[in-house]
Image (cartoon, coloured by chain):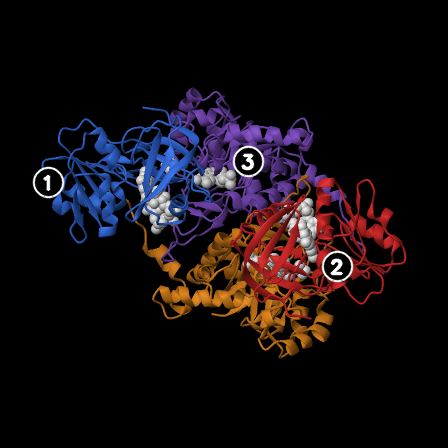
Chain colours: A red, B blue, C purple, D orange
Amino acid sequence: MSRPRRERRSVVAVEAIGAYVLVRVTRGSLDPGIPGQFFMLEAPGRVLPRPMSLCLAPRGELAFLLDPIGPGTRALAALEPNDRLHVFGPLGNGFRLDVERPLLVGGGIGIAPLPYLAEALEQPPAVLGFRSEHHAEAAALLPGADVVIDPVLVTDAMPGGRDVLACGPEPMLEAVRAIAPDAQLAWEAPMACGYGACYGCVVEIDGELKRLCVEGPVLCSS
Amino acid sequence: MSRPRRERRSVVAVEAIGAYVLVRVTRGSLDPGIPGQFFMLEAPGRVLPRPMSLCLAPRGELAFLLDPIGPGTRALAALEPNDRLHVFGPLGNGFRLDVERPLLVGGGIGIAPLPYLAEALEQPPAVLGFRSEHHAEAAALLPGADVVIDPVLVTDAMPGGRDVLACGPEPMLEAVRAIAPDAQLAWEAPMACGYGACYGCVVEIDGELKRLCVEGPVLCSS
Amino acid sequence: MQLLNASGCLDALTAPDVASSLDAFVTKTVTPEPREGNTPVRIAETDFGMLNAIGLANPGRDVFVRDVLPRLCDALDVPIWVSVGGFTAREYAETCEQLARDEVACVELNLSCPNVDEAPESAAEIVRACRDVTAKPLYAKVSPHSWDMGETVRAIEAAGADGLSLVNTLRGTTLDARLRPTLSRGTGGYSGPALRPVALAAVLAARRATSLPIVGMGGVETGRHALELIACGATHIALGTVLFADPDAPTRVRTELAAEIKSLGSGSAEDVFGVALDAVASEVNSATR
Amino acid sequence: MQLLNASGCLDALTAPDVASSLDAFVTKTVTPEPREGNTPVRIAETDFGMLNAIGLANPGRDVFVRDVLPRLCDALDVPIWVSVGGFTAREYAETCEQLARDEVACVELNLSCPNVDEAPESAAEIVRACRDVTAKPLYAKVSPHSWDMGETVRAIEAAGADGLSLVNTLRGTTLDARLRPTLSRGTGGYSGPALRPVALAAVLAARRATSLPIVGMGGVETGRHALELIACGATHIALGTVLFADPDAPTRVRTELAAEIKSLGSGSAEDVFGVALDAVASEVNSATR
Ligand SMILES: Cc1cc2nc3c(=O)[nH]c(=O)nc-3n(C[C@H](O)[C@H](O)[C@H](O)COP(=O)(O)OP(=O)(O)OC[C@H]3O[C@@H](n4cnc5c(N)ncnc54)[C@H](O)[C@@H]3O)c2cc1C
Ligand SMILES: Cc1cc2nc3c(=O)[nH]c(=O)nc-3n(C[C@H](O)[C@H](O)[C@H](O)COP(=O)(O)OP(=O)(O)OC[C@H]3O[C@@H](n4cnc5c(N)ncnc54)[C@H](O)[C@@H]3O)c2cc1C
Ligand SMILES: Cc1cc2nc3c(=O)[nH]c(=O)nc-3n(C[C@H](O)[C@H](O)[C@H](O)COP(=O)(O)O)c2cc1C
Ligand SMILES: Cc1cc2nc3c(=O)[nH]c(=O)nc-3n(C[C@H](O)[C@H](O)[C@H](O)COP(=O)(O)O)c2cc1C
Ligand code: FES
Ligand code: FES
């Protein structure tokens, strides 16, 4: 696994994609890592950086898809080309890629790690769920995916007999796990550091509180 | 005396004048007040506003000359046209204008209130001292003034027998007072509020600690 | 919900219009003897707040009662709270006796004066001594340095206080470019935005310990900030440092607060009162993955 | 001047390279029994700092000594300071006895644990109990909630401490959009930039009371911040919250500090040590106008 590095990178572009925002930064000598790994992005004016899954790794760039829901993500969404920010990663454990019949499942901003994952797995089938047409515009990042919109759920549209790799809100992941017990699921938790220093991101794993940034964010559900 | 008001104004222009910066804002319904009075300017990103003498009152505008020496004045100097900031004033007591043979004396950024004062007194003679040629470029705001540069001092160049109205650093004001005991002097003190609320700006006046923002900033030295 | 100024953050004689925009005016702390206050520099800005070392400048209680109080009454239509300071319980009580006049709506005991030990016994002793001599509503103003807010507050309530004012400043220092303390005294009271989480925690802890009214303060700049203090259990709100930047803050904060309450679908501040306490009790979300 | 991490702000086993960039590594507080820590949510950002309610998650002293300490020694070249917590003086002392091993360079007594009363007597009692059983250097870590820092520090020194660590977090609360406390526990420790003036004041007050070494901490993000703590009397500096945003902070802060010292025309941190104290003593500028 590649050692995480922290570098001051430049913003290449900030593009709206439906309700979300794609922030592209220069790659420098950062390693894009394994799909499902994440980076800590400096959020201008905030005390703590914000964890973001790598969404795309165009040549010479790293691209992050974000949902501007609070002060940190809004500060990131307000970046302009040539602005500079510190980027630290890749961090955590990504998806295992040695699966036979992959199916990607994403809910809302949970689509973020899937484009880069799809590339690694050579464009497997995917099911994406969104809460509105506007949000669903982000499906353009994953051409060929099946898209459902609330009140239809991804679990209504998931074909069986597949190796599921999923990312999305907690209730979605719980529902996916219920029908695909072996699924690889990418979880979230509030993180201060992303590299095991703060013990802020613990979640219950195998009956114990463990650091999601070290043990995850991708966990095997069973 | 006119009642102070607080309004959100727009920046018209920010211009370098030698080592100083002239910030021009739209006047709105603010009253420019009496020369020597001051305004509290919101300094973006800072907790407290900063006191600034009115320097010029072009039609529809208020203009402040500032020396970017710290976080507040640097934030003000970094404003750009159309940025907005709260401006509160006019505050304090200005110069008495009923003088017979006025002479304006300014040291460094102490030139700030003099252009507006000179206008009210119909361009009386003036002596200005600066610490460098670069700083002395600000003398352009007071055409016809005598200019001296360190190590020559304003007190070396002051003609006698005049009603002195002066603004400048404390040692200069002390020196002016020594040779012109009746001078009207505009003092400075750190201010949090500018309208008598905090008791932070006290200085010794007639043997007592009094609020400079209420009793001054212009005091009769004797 | 009443909106007040924080003691020491407004002079109603110099700015009567600002004082009149509040529901009550709180005086700067009055001490037995006149105090000139500290030598300047008395104030300094920090990155996220400010420091003050005014040093309780005030004319002393005799001049206050004889001279200042009548002028305040003339200048203001709103009730007057008098903040009282001292160095012994007896001094506080004597001042309270002098304040037994119709013009005084409420007495706020500033229990965070320099040299006043704020261990619960001592705070309680001061409150009790004052309770013995006055029928006026007595509010106790507590410092956030209190190690056990619950214990402090229970002791103060048992001693007969009618309400609490939370919080006073923290102790802070800031240095100038040449590494000298900016304030002549070296250290001052730290107020403003940085204090907000501390004020919320203090009010929350106090509200768990008592049902007395609480004047919440500490870094309030907007209606949202006021709303959060109310959600933590404040019954009233005081504005301090924000008044220096914005004398129109009382009217603005009131308007913003009403809009915040409306956007929550609530009718009044009372609906929001203490909701943060219920949340902690009820929400222990055990994560299972 | 040594650069350390603040306890609980770095795991040397997960990030040995970061720990090795320090002059010494301080462990997270070790308690007698293993503690799982608090239910999430455990951390929250505020506008000018952060809150944590980790809840002293640690494997307990037995597992720490048997299992973690040997692994720390293998992973690190730098000295190891062990932070010790507990609920009674006896618990602290028993842990100190277990830490009488060559691998432990220093013991830091975390005197700001929940349920540990931090009145001077109690802090002193803990220090004395530990002093009786260990010859290791003993540092006492004090909370900024202490009402009289000078008194606290003198009591701790008299009890036999070899040094002080200042400051621990303040208590703080923050609410989410729906007015529920963001942290499951309701309240947490407030750290980061907002703490800087509080840390400077605490170190200044402690330095006035003692000549013991002081590890200064609280919101240090840059060499300038470290310099200010040194000017207030800190002999060493610890980095806490900044490590979350910047794991390279130790190297950066060290470089910046050297540049700051050089720009002042000084040769080393020792030249700047305590200069803020001299300034207050000498500078009382009486304004005459
Ligand atoms: C490993 C990992 C990868 C992530 N990848 C992405 C990504 O690619 N794109 C993206 O937009 N977001 C991603 N997130 C989530 C993102 O980090 C948070 O939305 C962001 O930190 C919120 O910061 P904020 O200041 O905008 O909002 P805050 O004010 O911090 O939060 C706003 C609201 O969201 C809640 N919240 C905050 N953080 C989280 C969290 N981590 N999990 C659940 N709820 C939370 C808060 O409780 C609050 O209600 C990821 C999170 C993790 C842990
Ligand atoms: C009535 C009045 C009118 C003023 N008019 C002008 C003006 O027209 N143009 C202008 O440039 N400045 C003026 N000043 C001074 C100006 O307000 C300060 O320079 C400014 O507040 C400094 O803020 P800062 O954040 O940039 O620097 P700070 O970090 O606050 O200060 C930088 C340095 O300046 C010192 N300092 C700060 N404020 C003062 C003060 N008021 N007096 C003396 N020393 C101080 C500090 O101790 C520090 O060493 C005026 C001050 C007053 C009281
Ligand atoms: C300049 C200044 C003077 C103050 N004077 C007093 C005082 O005399 N008595 C008192 O109880 N509190 C005093 N305080 C504390 C405030 O009343 C208030 O408790 C504190 O500032 C926190 O509120 P804020 O963050 O909104 O300012 C003073 C605060 C400031 C900033
Ligand atoms: C996540 C987190 C965990 C902490 N855990 C401990 C601890 O276990 N023991 C301790 O003495 N201090 C602990 N602290 C306090 C820090 O050591 C330090 O005193 C405080 O954070 C102030 O420094 P800072 O502002 O640089 O973070 C913790 C702080 C944080 C942010
Ligand atoms: S985010 Fe800090 S330990 Fe996981
Ligand atoms: S600046 Fe506040 S009283 Fe003068």
At label 3, which amino acid type do we have?
Answer: Thr
Q: Residue furthest right?
A: A161
Tell me where residue D218 appears, x and y as whole percent.
Answer: 53, 57
Q: Residue at label 3? A: C222
| D132, D136: nearer the viewer | D136
Tell me where residue D252 appears, x and y as whole percent.
Answer: 50, 66
Q: CA distance from mark 1 to mark 2?
A: 84 Å
The yes-or-no answer for disc 1 within 8 Å of ligand 2 is: no
| A83, C57: nearer the viewer | A83
On the same chain, marks 3 and 1? The answer is no
Q: Secondary structure at mark 3?
A: loop
**C-beta proximity under 8 Å, tags 3 and 1:** no
At label 2, which amino acid type do we have?
Answer: Ala
Tell me where residue C80 appears, x and y as whole percent.
Answer: 49, 26
Residue D146 in the image: above or below residue B53: below
Q: Secondary structure at mark 2?
A: helix
Q: Residue at label 2? A: A118
Q: Secondary structure at mark 1?
A: loop
